[in-house]
Image (spheres, rainbow, N blue to C red):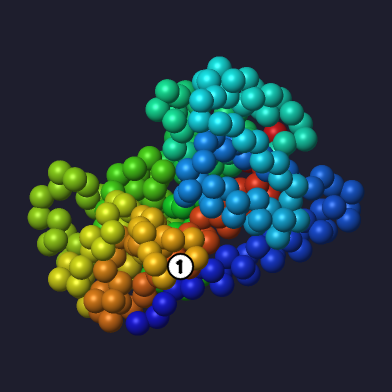
Amino acid sequence: MELIDGKAVATEIKQQIAEEVKQIVAAGGKRPHLAAILVGHDGGSETYVANKVKSCAECGFESTLIRYESDVTEAELLAKIDELNNNPEIDGFIVQLPLPKHINEQKIIESVSYKKDVDGFHPINVGRMSIGLPCFVSATPKGIVELLKHYNIETKGKNCVVLGRSNIVGKPVASLMMQKGTDATVTICHSHTQNLKNICKNADIIIAALGKPEFVTADMVKDGAVIIDVGTTRVPSTETKSGFKLKGDVKFDEVAPKCSYITPVPGGVGPMTICSLMINTLAAGKKIYYR
Ligand code: GUN
């Protein structure tokens, strides 16, 4: 069994980005600039956004964090998004999800210009991705495919089972895995799937993204399978300073010995997600996909 070290891969890619940014700036080009909107004080979102800002510094990007209290109105958010859409200094921006219930999340996602949508959540980017056109691909799916490539893990013709059908991970990662070049045969399982255990047992690659801690157990995994664990449920813990720890969707201790490759939580998919956002921000700065 080989542990997939997402943290090390992400560090390597961020160093390459920093090198490229240095050259861009030295040649008189613009330093990429990412803005992030954070609403409220959800612990998970606070951590993710802090890590995104930190990664921007590591890559040599400018970053701007815009904060609102959770009673911000939808109109105020839409006005800020409109301002960012029209500000040539900002190359790309994200609105950290989830948003408070009184705000229509889909409306917010669709109000971000697809040209600055480095999260790849806008329907234009989702649609372009699904038909294989150049676009911003959402960060977690992109990070997963990068990891598989980095470790030279064969995907062509392999049975890939995706657990979960979220718009952020399940659906887009399934779409990427079956695309030309990746060439996996993909099955998506969700809360209404029958015979889930048997379907998993037949998988060469399992991508677990349902947000249910330790859902995938050893009896669901074929010998030699590749396991990608996207779960990041925060559970209380007395072992850490912060008072919580992240739990994956896979029962790591019993599943790991059966695998050829497995991602740990933390340190697997998580760091790659942020790294993909950095790749997208560099592409936004270089106006690679859209002018
Ligand atoms: N919430 C959970 N994952 C993400 C992400 O990738 N981007 C944003 N904006 N919010 C998230």
Instruction: Specify whether tag 1 is near ligand 1 (CB below 8 Å).
Output: no
Image mark count: 1
Q: Nearer the viewer, residue 66 or 184?
A: 66
Residue 117: percent from the left, percent from the top? 58, 36
Can residue 257 be spotted in the picture?
yes
Whether residue 263 sits left or right of residue 224 in the image: it is right
Whether residue 267 sits left or right of residue 158 in the image: it is right
Q: Is residue 225 above or below residue 50?
A: below
Q: Amino acid at mark 1?
A: Thr
Residue positioned 65% across, 62% down in the render: 14
Whether residue 269 sits left or right of residue 113 in the image: it is left
Q: Is residue 168 above or below residue 196?
A: above
Q: Nearer the viewer, residue 104 or 45?
A: 45
Q: Is residue 273 above or below residue 16?
A: above
Q: Quadrant of the C terminus?
A: top right
Displayed quadrant of residue 208? bottom left
Q: Nearer the viewer, residue 103 or 193?
A: 103
Q: Is residue 253 above or below residue 72?
A: below
Q: Secondary structure at mark 1?
A: loop
* Residue labelled with disc 1: 240
Q: Quadrant of the N terminus?
A: bottom left
Residue 282: percent from the left, percent from the top? 68, 50
Residue at far top of view: 75
Q: Nearer the viewer, residue 80 or 120?
A: 80
Displayed quadrant of residue 183? bottom left
Residue positioned 81% across, 59% down in the render: 22
Residue 65: percent from the left, percent from the top? 66, 41
Residue positioned 19% across, 45% down in the render: 191
Residue positioned 34% across, 62% down in the render: 248
Can residue 159 be spotted in the picture?
no
Within-10-Å neighbours for mark 1: few <14, some 14–19, many 20+: few
